[in-house]
Amino acid sequence: MTVRIPTHELVGLLTDLSLTAADPEVGNATAGVLLHTVRGYDGDTPGKTDLLVGTSTDGIVLGHTHVPCSGQADPMLWPIGDVTAVLAVLKPLAKNKDHAVEITREGDVFAVAEDRDLFGEGLTLTFAAADAEEFPPGAWSMLSELAVSPPEGSQPALARTDFVASRIAPFLKIAARRKSMVSWFRWHQRLPVVVEIGSEYRGLISPYAYNDEDRSAGVAPGGDVYPLAVE
């Protein structure tokens, strides 16, 4: 397998997905970025092209995006520590928009190397593969098969949805890097909220489950507003 990809595209994809991956100390497949290739549509470009698709999750937030590439490959699970190392090396090179790398795999070893056609025997990074089959299989159905009905036994939908601030932070960073609007799609205070950033990024965030037995707390904001008194 060989996948050729512009370096700035790979760096952007890994940068965004590293924000929604689990901490390395978790030690399982969520502490990584799953990459696979498909034939699909790249923005407004007519016809299908090769795409490198990436997905990551820590169980609370989920990120999913794609970039154009050349070539097809089997699914690859890159441990988050290796993703960080690859980014450290490639980010300076990505400033050259013509720079490209090739991703290959031999056995249980991945290699990310500068395009030999452009740079000859240039830089090569190698690291051990992780088991892609251990990545949570329900990630893509959660993103595409949207649940719009209230969970069984829950209260009807309320206006209020609570989020832990640190869980929102990755999506704000991603939107800032992409210079795109953040769109939130929610249906119920206890259902996951879909996040859309531009046309190539979709995420998911699980809300904080507050006690919705007191419906007044979920209908409108609490607290007081003190307008300026005009004499």
Image (cartoon, rainbow, N blue to C red):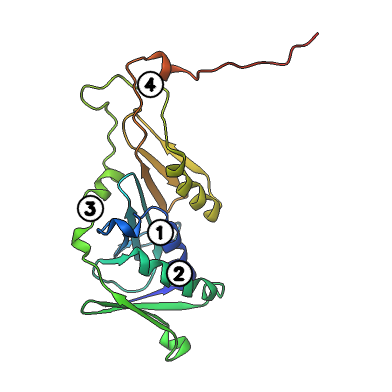
**Between marks 2 and 4 in the image, the one whose residue lies nearer the viewer:** 2
Q: Is residue 90 left or right of residue 70?
A: right
According to the picture, the residue beneath numbered tag 3 turns out to be: 136
**Quarter occupied by the N terminus:** bottom left
Amino acid type of the residue that numbered disc 2 sits on in the rendered structure:
Leu
Q: CA distance from mark 3 to mark 2?
A: 24 Å
According to the picture, the residue beneath numbered tag 4 turns out to be: 158
Q: Which mark is residue 170?
A: none
Against 111, is 190 above or below? Answer: above
Asked if disc 2 and disc 1 are in contact, CB closer than 8 Å, the reply is yes
Instruction: Mark 2 or mark 1: name the one nearer the start of the chain.
Output: 1
Q: Is residue 33 left or right of residue 201?
A: left
According to the picture, the residue beneath numbered tag 1 turns out to be: 18
The residue carrying pointer 4 sits among few (fewer than 14), some (14 to 19) or many (20 or more) residues within 10 Å by Cα, namely: some
* Residue 49 in view in this figure: no
- Element type at mark 1: helix
Q: CA distance from mark 1 to mark 3?
A: 16 Å
Q: Position of residue 125 (x, y in %)?
A: 38, 80
Amino acid type of the residue that numbered disc 1 sits on in the rendered structure:
Ser
Q: Residue at x 31, y 33 (%)?
A: 191
The residue carrying pointer 2 sits among few (fewer than 14), some (14 to 19) or many (20 or more) residues within 10 Å by Cα, namely: some
